[in-house]
Amino acid sequence: MSDIDLDQRPANNRSAVLKSRLTSWDSIILVLTVLVLIIASFTVDNFGTSRNFTFMVLDLLPIILIALPMTMIIVTGEIDLSVASTLGLTSSMMGWLWNQGLSIESIIPLCIVIGAICGVVNGFLITGLGLPSLAVTIGTLALYRGLAFVVLGDGAVADFPWNYTGWVTGTIGDGAVPNVLILIVVLALIFGIVQHATPFGRSLYAIGANAQAAHFSGIRVARTKFWLYVASGAVAGLVGVLWTLRYSSARADNGAGLELAVVAAVLLGGVSIFGGKGSLPGVLGGVVLLTALQNALRLEDVSGQALNIVTGSLLVLSVLLPNVTSAVRGNWHRRKLRQASATSAQ
Amino acid sequence: MTATSLEAPPSKRFSLGGLLKTRELGIVLALTLLVAYTAIDNSRFLSGQSIRDNLLNTAILAVMATGQAIVVITRNIDLSVGSVLGISAFAVATLMSNNQDLPMIVALLAGLAIGAVAGLVNGVLVRYGKVPALVVTLGTLYIYRGITYSWAGGSQVNADELPRHFLTFANDSILGVPWLVLIALVVIAAGSVMMRNYRIGRELYAIGSSPPAAELAGIKVARNLLTAFVLSGALAGLAGVLYAARFGTVDAAAGNGMELNVVAAVVVGGVAVFGGSGSVWGAALGALLLTVIGSALAVLDINQFWQQAIVGALIILAICADRLVAVRIARSLRKRDAHV
Amino acid sequence: MLRSPRTLLSVTSAALLVAGLTACGGTTKDSASNTSGGGQSAAAADPNAAVKEGLKIAFLPKQLNNPYSDVETGGGKVAVEELKGEYKLVGPNDASASSQVSYINTLIQQQQDVIVVAANDPNAVCPSLNQARAAKIKVITFDSDASKDCRDAFINQATTEGIGQSLAKMALEQAGGEGEIAVLSATPNATNQNSWIEVMKEELKKPEYSKLKLVKVAYGNDDDQKSFQEAQGLLQSYPNLKAIVAPTTVGIAAAARYISSSSYKGKVAVTGLGLPNQMREYVKDDTVKKFALWNPADIGYLAAFAGANMASGKITGAQGEKFTAGKLGEYTIGADGEIVLGPPTEFTKENIDQFNF
């Protein structure tokens, strides 16, 4: 996708402008996130309480975890729209396996593996057969969700053991820090280090900027992308398990539509849909910003309908604003140059 | 990016036609097999009522697939169509229930206009905002739906509030062909002719094959892209009117999630997601195939849960087939070039 | 990616290894003891306590844009005004199991006194409802019950037996005493519909129903378009169908709309549970002869009064306690905290214009 779409970009001094634009958008998002959190704590009743903090962490759990590998995938210029369906399929499988009498301790790793296998299928179709990721993952989006319904039908499995479901919704020592926050921090650290502090991570940006050039400079493009999809599937599987335990309900329709929320959060965090740029801190900021806004608006009794408009507008603005500012800056720069040349001519 | 854009101009029409032929023939073949198998199992599948139901169900999807095909051919995508259908269906239903005497044509025009405005917003953001179509239309998917929800506020328009002539429009027919189907056929035919025989259509293919090349060749990319998005929006708006007339009950959730069905129909119908190839009537065939699969499963008494999985598998199969054909053409072209 | 088949192999074998390692010993379905915590110790009821004013009573229906829920919560609003309380209505746009949880959490944060909820999934909302109860919020379920151990009382529109029997009776009448009938239900795991269908099936085993044959239970997922297409599929698969029984307002309206515009009109009867306003057109054009429903506004009304009485300490939800629900009169709490509204009303061409909901 990337090598084709690159040429749609404006050709003028690309990398320098992009780089400054990127860093500024990252920081804008982070500042915006902190601002929203501070303003909401002071103005919205019950926002800054420890219980609300727990609720918010639980609400952003699925989006933030799936966003970690999704960020890498989008940085390489690809996309994975099948994540929410993978989540649904693992949730269904979890219910089915539990009904078969397997122990929860073996079901959980199995479910993560099932998610990984979904990723393997995506990865093979995309890197092995060279098919476009957008079309492939729209296909597997339907396929995995369909299989989820085939496995469990419209039924629900609910009798998961209390010590597991309680752990997911519980807090450390009954304080304010939810148990799952540990999981989020650990995974975010791992993915953050891999993406920003390893040769592998840097190779992702090279692939996203120009896959062919990356290939010729010795980066194994196909293999890298393949493993990203496996990681994406495995994380979606893990989230399927967490989702099921949080709501103590394994259902085939779990997480339906979540893929759009994840992609929206990643793009809002400043990752380019064309690949090659974006950072994990920006994405984490994007996820927290969206969740905090939704939470605050809901506490203020703003209807869920209005939330749709806010999410959509933020998404478009996140890409539109940097474009507009850079265009304005470019104009201003050109005019200055012209003035400068005019004065020197005199 | 299929190999078609690499072809030399003289041979282009011929092999492009060949490629399309194989793709669309494949769908027709699959459709025939499916209908034959289902009819053998239950002959009522070929009864007048059943054929009518299938065509009526396809009509709305096919109208949207026509617009989507045009956008996808330019190497863009319009994910907002489901939400545009929703806003148009609700607006038109409200309009008609408040003004019982308005003729049907006003409803149709209103739907087209609302959709066209929604499409224009998409197009402007894509072209002048330089925001990728995927991002813009994902955003407007949320925004248009949110507007509809806020406006409707949980209310819905029931069949008994709508004027008689509006509701009967969905079932009335001339010469045995329901209006709904007729409109869909006109839309598909007009779209096909425009894309095949008119300058704008060929330019849209050129843009999809290589946007910078199209720009260099002097094609007015901006105007053409806007046209494509406005068409897609307007057709989704028209689909909204048809939806309201057919189903009678309209709430803010009308058409929710339909964008995936539409994209699926287009992809199954042989339009490459990276633009430049495929046809409008192929996309319409894709819509027909998806609808018939749905009703065949119900008739064959196969667990309805399989439907979505089958659609998914079909999409993947379709893009695999496209890839295979593209690779083969590229190889044969390379051979021909070697001889020269 | 020539290596991927091997990768697949190694991933799968790793999976099997993991499964094998952990298979012996662990928590399984049979060994799991499900003691979900939460709840509050039942304080003694004080029948003489006054019903408090200014109570914050929040309604959380299955989803917002559903005309049936609107009527129910509308009744609740009237009751809350009579009680001089603060009424609030929140809810998701889709009837998915998990979407309600965020709203319950928000209501906990806002420290409501009563949450009146129609559960989309009896278990998914449980942990949150128990958190609410731990925060001294009274939880009343209506329309669709949550698990017994995470709510204080359930407003049952009618007894399950009553509805199931009424459905079977209407089906017999409408089918003309014999022939094939089909059910068009909501979702396959809808608590209400499933229990009514169960009773109906039991009823059909009786000798007076021996000529009636239930050929299929189809599911329209309470989605208008899906129900419409399911009705269509039923008639294609079962040409001799005499009647469609739809125990859901969305289903019956969609089925009636399909029949009234198809060649099956007059040949196939539609009956079940529906809203008079939605069905009026089809009753008047003779597609539908008779259908039934309780007054949904009364459900919301009763739920608000039950919640207010409970938040005031007049009742606790124990069996045998009595309370007065405004214009509806006195109610007695049944087993498992169930409060039954009363028998359903049957609607026909003659009486339908007397109802407006």
Image: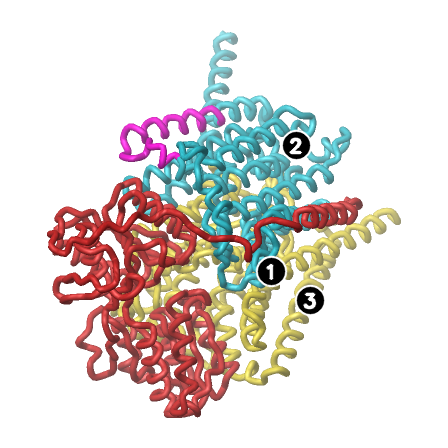
State the SS at label 3.
helix
- Residue C16: percent from the left, percent from the top? 71, 50
Marking on residue A206:
none
Taking the spot 44% from the left edge, 92% from the top edge, the residue there is: C211
Q: Secondary structure at mark 1?
A: loop
Q: Chain of mark 3?
A: B
Residue numbers of the magenta segment: A26-53
Query: Mark 3 highlights which residue?
Result: B26
Identify the image quadrant of residue C354. bottom left
Q: Nearer the viewer, residue B183 or C253?
A: C253
Residue at left 37%, top 66%? B244
Percent position of residue A195, x then y: 62, 29
Residue at point 74%, 32% (across, down) = A219
> Which residue is tagged 1?
A100
Give the colour chain B carries in the figure: yellow
Q: Which chain contains the residue that carries disc 1?
A: A
Name, please, the residue furthest toward the front.
C44
Dot 1: few (<14), some (14–19), or many (≥20) neighbours within 10 Å? Answer: few
Q: CA distance from mark 1 to mark 3?
A: 41 Å
Residue placed most toward the observer, C137 or C300: C137
Residue A204 tag number: 2
Q: Compare residues B242 and C86 and report the one nearer the observer.
A: C86
Q: Which chain is cyan?
A: A
Relative to residue C34, is residue B164 drawn left or right? left
Amino acid marked by disc 1: Gln
The answer to whether the residue labelled 3 contacts the one labelled 2, judged by CB atoms less than 8 Å apart, is: no
Depicted A12 relative to depicted A236: above or below = above
Callout 3 amino acid: Gly
